[in-house]
Image (cartoon, helix red, strand yellow):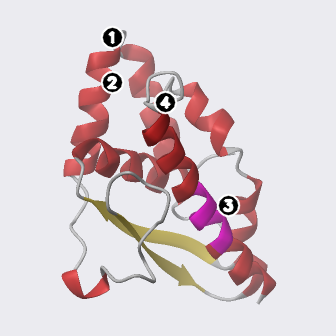
Amino acid sequence: MAAQAFEEIAETFEFLDDWEDRYRHVIELGREMPPLDEAVKVPATKVEGCASQVWLLPRITGQGPQARFDFDGESDAMIVRGLIAVLHALYSGLSVTEVLAVDATAELGRLGLTEHLSQQRSNGVRAMVERIRLLAAQTAAG
């Protein structure tokens, strides 16, 4: 279960045979994301466990299990910024209950990302997914 925007990325990846083309596409997705305001780049929004600097700012509408999840994010590394865009496409607009049901490893595996990222980048993606899941779980619990 993934948001429609992620399905569109998955479809695009099916047409991109070469990993270099996919890599460029991920970077382009990151370039399209608006930058975060410097005022929100604080320890509370910083994701630990990433080799690059990463900030995720949740935007949750509503309360409890049916609250809608969204977030803004930024990184100082272009590929990581692109990975944030991919995660945004995966989770944005889902309820917090749906966010918790997403198998991020399987969904990202559909894109072939897992076998083409360095160990550090893979750890960073896991750290971002864990932060997203934590935010969703906290909201779902009320």
Going from the N terminus, do you reach mark 2 or mark 3 first?
2
Q: Pointer 1: what residue?
A: 18
Q: Pointer 2: what residue?
A: 22
Tell me which residue sits at (30%, 27%) in the image.
23
Going from the N terminus, do you reach mark 4 or mark 1 first?
4
The secondary structure making up most of the magenta span is: helix
User: Badge 4 local density, few (<14 within 10 Å), some, or many (20+)?
Assistant: some
Say whether residue 105 is magenta: no
How far across and how far down the image is residue 86, in percent? 43, 46
Quarter where residue 105 is shown:
top right
**Callout 1 amino acid:** Asp
How far across and how far down the image is residue 88, in percent? 45, 56
User: Badge 3 local density, few (<14 within 10 Å), some, or many (20+)?
Assistant: many
Report the magenta residues as a range.
129-134
Q: Could you tell me if the residues under marks 2 and 1 are in contact, i.e. CB atoms within 8 Å?
A: yes
**Gap in Å between the C-alphas at discs 2 and 3?**
25 Å
**Callout 4 amino acid:** Ala
Q: Quadrant of the C terminus?
A: bottom right
**Gap in Å between the C-alphas at discs 4 and 3?**
18 Å
